[in-house]
Amino acid sequence: MWFGHLALLFLLMNQSLFSQQTGIDSLEKYFRIDSTDDASFIYSYFPPIFIQNGIELKSFVRSNIISDIRRQFSDLQSVDAIYIQAMKLTNNNTAISLLISTLACFDHRLVGLKVPVFALYFPLTNESEEEFKARVANLPRYLYADSPKNKIGDRDKLQHFFGSAFLTFIFESKSPAEELSRSIEVGEDAIIVDGALDERDMRANRHGQNFGLALIQNKFVLPSDYFLNIK
């Protein structure tokens, strides 16, 4: 009888290990950018397709796939997965992929602008409150070695990173992104409700610029490589 129990235990352990490995293998497909040779990426410039791609990427960020990648691999690899999924949705349209990645990583639902006497608030997403909270809660947050070890971490740095990468890529230069990010950060506290100059934001901007510049030469580079430098 004891032999039968041991055999059953062995089978259960093997099944558990197999299931875990199968789960890991199934997630690894989200770490590859597939090469495409056709011109189908052009369609992602059309507003209806662009909007749909943005909605689908936000849904992907909310999904269990991202939480599984964060748990089984790392937050940095989940950042790669978000960008790679954007590339798949847009048929490797790098510019649009960077733009919808920026939008999918916004961690504010509203932005408030300071005007005389009162403030004006504008929506940054068409998600429901429940969808917005689920997406933000699932955003990667431990991006740097010095990322705060709390529930927020550096999740707000993703929008800076991808936004700067987008500007650098479309202008093929760091200069426009540097000037715009500097103007935004310096003026943020003056015109945006609860805005403040943040050196960590500026660092994420610089790393995004490096990523955008690298994409001009090689569209298969990944974001995670550009978060490793802490300076």
Image (spheres, rainbow, N blue to C red):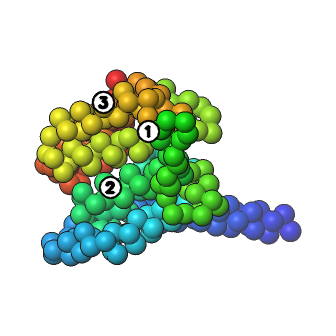
If the image is split into quadrants, where does the N terminus sit? bottom right
Distance from label 3 to label 2 (Cα)? 19 Å
61 is higher (above) or lower (below) than 171: below
Q: What residue is at 33 percent from the left and 74 percent from the top?
A: 49
Q: What residue is at 49 percent from the left and 35 percent from the top?
A: 116
Q: What residue is at 41 percent from the left and 55 percent from the top?
A: 103
Picture disc at residue 157: 1
Instruction: Using the rendered view, name the quadrant where residue 62 is placed.
Output: bottom right
Q: Position of residue 69 (x, y in %)?
A: 51, 54
**Mark 2: which amino acid?**
Leu
Can residue 36 be seen by looking at this rendering? yes
**Badge 1 density bin: few <14, some 14–19, many ≥20, Cα 10 Å:** many
If the image is split into quadrants, where does the C terminus sit? top left
Whichever of callouts 2 and 1 sits on the residue coming sooner in the sequence is 2
- Front residue of 165/20: it is 165
**Mark 3: which amino acid?**
Arg
- Front residue of 56/108: it is 108
Q: Position of residue 70 (x, y in %)?
A: 53, 50
Task: Locate residue 187 relative to residue 6 in the image: left or right.
Answer: left
Q: Position of residue 177 (x, y in %)?
A: 24, 38
Picture disc at residue 99: 2
Return the residue at label 3.
182
Judged from the image, the secondary structure of the residue bearing numbered disc 3 is helix
Whichever of callouts 1 and 3 sits on the residue coming sooner in the sequence is 1
165 is higher (above) or lower (below) than 125: above
Task: Locate residue 62 relative to residue 172 in the image: left or right.
Answer: right
Q: Position of residue 6 (x, y in %)?
A: 77, 62
103 is higher (above) or lower (below) than 74: below
Q: What residue is at 47 percent from the left and 38 percent from the top?
A: 115
